[in-house]
Amino acid sequence: MHLDVLDLRNFYYRSPLGRAAQKVIRDQLVGLWPEAQGQTVVGYGFAVPLLRPYLAKARRVIGLMPGPQGVMAWPAGQPNVSVLCEEAMWPVPTGMVDKLVLMHGLETSEHPSAVLEEAWRVLGPGGRVVFIVPNRAGIWSRTDRTPFGYGRPYSMSQLEVQLRSHNFVPERTLSTLYQPPSPRRVWRKAARFLETAGRHMPVFAAGGVLIVEASKQVTTPSRMRLTEAVRRPLRVLEGLGAPAPEPARRPQPTSL
């Protein structure tokens, strides 16, 4: 089920824990994509908190928000780029997107295959997509204090299998949010240390969020090759009987 857009806004923009989580995830995204000069960047679900670094130089930034969740104007104080859309019908032309981010859009959807099909459709040649989902093994998916406690959490292998089945090729994978989902200030102060320790010692703790960067796989259309066509030439007169030979003519008698 989708969370209400007001609950998501209050978490990421009005709670200290949400602002801390936003910064950690956004820093990871910028590490994967340091720039988007002249490109089209689209976010689906509630990905707008991560798109602000691309507003200045991207050719176009669009925030798609599913109907069951609702939409809010974003960014504050600037022209709105948020759009309300259907899960299986995004108002984006095919192949237009260079960079696509999904957060709180896949795990909460009742039709994840439709969401992945739309993501594949709008992504252009050479484009990349980042999927951000709750980690099944992390503690963030085990509490409903944060948006990552709702929907279907994933393991890394489950997410990769689902992406490959929809013609995405995982390129880079990582986890983040190693700090506990607690509002206590002591944990926020230790956030940098915990993130560094978690990345270098995976057994120390399971990150609350999985991040997978993937590319679009374009399959070769199945058709008869030229060599196969030559081996099976078209026989226009196939099935017609062979012409019967003409009867032999009798010699005509000659006159004396």
Image: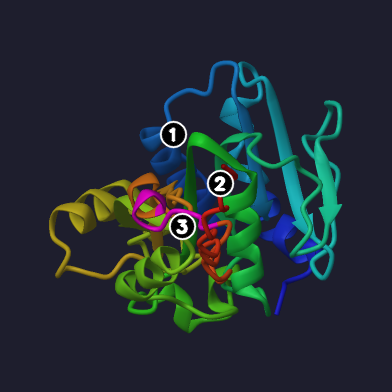
For the point 37% across and 37% down, the residue is 32
Q: Amino acid at mark 3?
A: Ser
Where residue 88 sits: x, y (%)? 74, 64
Where residue 205 sits: x, y (%)? 23, 70
Question: Residue 184 versus residue 244: which sits nearer the camera?
Answer: 244
Residue 254: assigned label: 2
Give the mark nearer the N terminus: 1 vs 3.
Answer: 1
Give the mark nearer the N terminus: 1 vs 2.
Answer: 1
The stretch of residues the image draws in magenta is 229-235
Where residue 175 sits: x, y (%)? 32, 58
For the point 84% across and 28% down, the residue is 77
Question: Residue 218 versus residue 230: which sits nearer the camera?
Answer: 230
Is 226 within the magenta? no
Q: Nearer the viewer, mark 1 or mark 2?
A: 2
Q: Amino acid at mark 2?
A: Thr
Residue 65: assigned label: none
